[in-house]
């Protein structure tokens, strides 16, 4: 898989608006990967594919996830916003035959996880602070990321979980574990 191929796949499978977001994430993930010592091309490929299943129907996502361990999660139905990440990981691994590392970067791009690899962290944070993002907190996290990537990750998780809790929504344990992990690191 080349960056060009990932770019054209995303363009073919996504609406213009979603593709624009994807391009912004790819540019940002590449920059973060350089700073984190990850392979910038792998980060760009993972970023171009991170939302590849974003516009698929529930039926397609569920079909893609058939047999995946994540479906057995007690609250699986509550995590509708994460389905595209989980299904995207299956798609890039099984349909495109890409590496587990890239599949993991897609899988964890919305939830995050404790101890993210530099590649995973590049895509996770880029999805939060890419140029097109304007939601509350994105500008603040973008500013923090200029100096301290891990603090930016911790702050993004804090804001994301705070937002879910304020709406009375369920928080995926991966995000809670990620939050604990990165907040704890800030104390060292
Ligand atoms: Fe996404
Ligand atoms: Fe995204």
Image (cartoon, grey):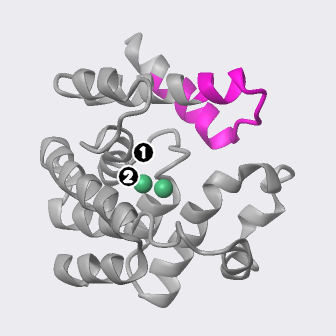
Magenta stretch secondary structure, dominant? helix
Q: Secondary structure at mark 1?
A: loop
For ligand 2, the image quadrant comes to bottom left
Mark 1 highlights which residue? 116
Answer whether labels 1 and 2 touch (C-beta < 8 Å).
yes
Secondary structure state at the residue bearing disc 2: helix
Q: Nearer the viewer, residue 18 or 145?
A: 18
Q: Residue at x 52, y 22 (%)?
A: 158
From mark 1 to mark 2, how far is it between C-alphas? 6 Å
Residue 131 is inside the magenta segment: no
Query: Badge 1 local density, few (<14 within 10 Å), some, or many (20+)?
Result: some
Q: Residue 15's quadrant in the figure?
A: bottom left
Q: Where residue 105 sits: x, y (%)?
A: 41, 59
Q: Quadrant of the N terminus?
A: bottom left
| Region in magenta | 161-182
Which dot marks residue 120?
A: 2
Residue 168 is covered by the magenta coloring: yes
Front in this rendered view, residue 159 or 95? 159
Residue 169 appears left or right of 105: right
Q: Whole-percent x and y of residue 42?
A: 24, 67
Q: Residues within 10 Å of mark 2 (few under 14, many from 20)?
A: many
Q: Residue furthest top?
A: 187
Q: Name the side, left or right, on which 31 lies relative to 6.
A: left
- The residue positioned 45% from the left and 62% from the top of the image is 106
Q: Position of residue 124 (x, y in %)?
A: 40, 46
The front one of 155 and 164 is: 164
Against 173, is 18 above or below? below
Residue 141 percent location from the top left of the image: 33, 25
């Amino acid at each position: 898989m080349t960056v060009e191929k990932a770019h054209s796949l995303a363009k073919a499978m996504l609406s213009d608006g979603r593709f624009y977001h994807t391009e912004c994430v790819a540019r940002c993930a590449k920059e973060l990967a350089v700073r984190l010592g990850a392979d910038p091309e792998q980060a760009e490929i993972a970023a171009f594919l991170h939302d590849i299943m974003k516009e698929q129907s529930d039926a397609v996502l569920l079909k893609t996830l058939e047999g995946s361990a994540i479906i057995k999660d007690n609250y699986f139905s509550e995590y509708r916003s994460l389905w595209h990440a989980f299904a995207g990981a299956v798609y890039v691994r099984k349909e495109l035959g890409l590496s587990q590392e890239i599949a993991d970067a897609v899988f964890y791009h919305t939830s995050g996880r404790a101890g993210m690899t530099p590649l995973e962290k590049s895509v996770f944070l880029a999805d939060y602070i890419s140029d097109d993002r304007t939601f509350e907190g994105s500008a603040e996290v973008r500013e923090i990321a200029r100096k301290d990537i891990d603090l930016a990750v911790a702050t993004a998780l804090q804001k994301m979980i705070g937002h879910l809790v304020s709406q009375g929504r369920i928080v995926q344990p991966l995000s809670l574990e990620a939050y604990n992990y990165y907040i704890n690191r800030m104390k060292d």
